[in-house]
Image (spheres, rainbow, N blue to C red):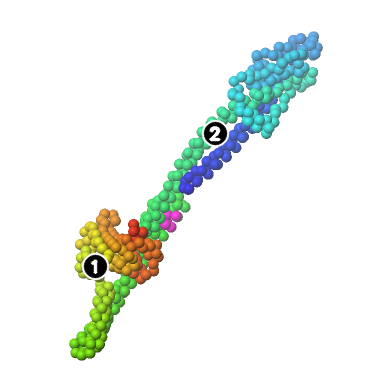
Amino acid sequence: MRLVLQLVARLLVVVILCLTAATVWATVDAYRSVDRATAASADRVSEALQALYWRELLLRSSRMNEHLLPVPEWRTTDTMKLISPGICVQFEPAKPFEKPLCGQSQGLGKAPPHWFASAVQTFLGGHAAVARPISARETTAGVVSASPDPDAAIRLAWAHILDNIGVALLMAAAIALLASLAIAHTLAPARSIVAALQRMAHGQYRTGLPRFHSMELGMIGKAVTDLGDRLAAAMEERAALTRRLLEIRDDERRALARELHDEFGQNLTAILAFANTIEAGAQDKTVVEDARMISQASLRIMASLRDTLNRLRHPPAEELGLEASLISLVDSWRSQHAARPLIQLDMQGDLADVRGTVAATAYRVAQECLTNALRHSAAQEIVLRIERRSGEENALLIRVEDDGGGDAASVQQSAGFGLTGIRERLAALGGSLSIARARRGVSVAATIPLAA
């Protein structure tokens, strides 16, 4: 999962938790606000009735206190204005069959869900009534008792939650959106770092990264840049060492070729001459036959020696050019294997100016792959393709594909000197080698950069 999505998901979890906590707090506050409204209603009504009581007492001083109770005309519109919605007020002592005076309870909002009412009743309990004396100096003046309507209290709490939850949801969505954009913007440079690492995995080690504003990302980018520079330097040093090793190996091969030619070649020529002399002058048929066999063996050894010398010396690609040397190589294999298999040569692009080390390496790759296909498979057809790719690739592609039914995995894991030598030569030029399963056999492909 992407880091941005992980951070956004965690942010959403935090927002949901905060929203839940805010909802719970709003529920408790809205429910307890009914108690505050109850006390406030009791205070307001008691103050109003106190003023009414003392006015009646002063105007009608001839009356006894008990004749003033209950306070005359207290159930008025003015008194109703002092009572909060959903609150009922009762004057004590009350007249017989007198009902409490209740505030407006209509329009307090929709009825809440049953689960909400049950949860509030279970966790927050009910509301207590509030009693206020009309006069602290005159205890017989009566008492105002205010109590909330339970249904109205639940509806008030639900309406309060609905009013606030919308704003809370909007704020939560805005916070989540803005924070997500901020996180995405902050982590955007990580894509450049990942792209640089991917380019490094494909061999482009020196990949410059922009300067990041974040200190942590800047440190990571600098570490990636330094790593790429060190890898590039190490690969260049490795390529130089490999080229030097190949030069030394070629020098040794040329020296060995000279020694073989001078020593073995001359000795074989002498043996062949002696055998021919013996065959010409001998009278005994057995001796003649033996001399003839020695001559044939010498010729076979000389042919094998010539083939070895050809492989040890510089390939003809450095002298004749890649195109001519490949044609000569295929013709040579065709003449040696007239019966099977069918060898096809497919050359694409301009190969005329491909010379030097690149041409020699391409020739060696084609030679080794053809040798392996002929010796280690029962192929009936072998296709050698040489393609010069221009443009951004600017590389030479050599592909040898056979229908011998070989195992590509086994060939890939082979530790033979031939494939090892090919890999070393390609590595020295910055190229690559891949071995894959073909339709009916094995496909070996090598890529050599022409800019090397």
Front residue of this view, candidates 304 and 313:
304
Q: State the residue at coordinates (76%, 9%).
A: 60
Q: Quadrant of the C terminus?
A: bottom left
Marker disc for residue 338: 1
Q: Position of residue 133 (x, y in %)?
A: 75, 21
Query: Residue 70, relative to residue 194: is it above or below?
Result: above
Crowding at dot 2, Cα within 10 Å, few <14 / some 14-19 / many 20+, comes out as some
Task: Check contact, mark 2 vs mark 1: CB within 8 A.
Answer: no
Furthest residue in direction front, as rendered: 285
In which image quadrant can residue 62 be found?
top right
Q: Which residues are magenta?
A: 220-224
From the viewer's perspective, tell me whether residue 15 is left or right of residue 380: right
- The answer to if 110 sits in the magenta stretch is no
Q: CA distance from mark 2 to mark 1?
A: 87 Å
Q: Main secondary structure of the magenta part?
A: helix
Type of amino acid under label 1: Ala
The residue located at (59%, 24%) in the rendering is 110
* Residue 442 appears anywhere in the view: no
In the rendering, which numbered label is found on residue 168? 2
Dot 1, how many residues are within 10 Å of its Cα: few (below 14), some (14-19), or many (20+)?
few
Q: Amino acid at mark 2?
A: Ala
Point out residue 338 in the picture as x, y percentages from the top left corner.
24, 67
Q: Secondary structure at mark 1?
A: loop
| Above-or-below relation of 424 to 103 | below
Q: In the rendered structure, find residue 12 and report the number of the disc placed on it.
A: none
Give 118 or 244, whichever is nearer the viewer.
118
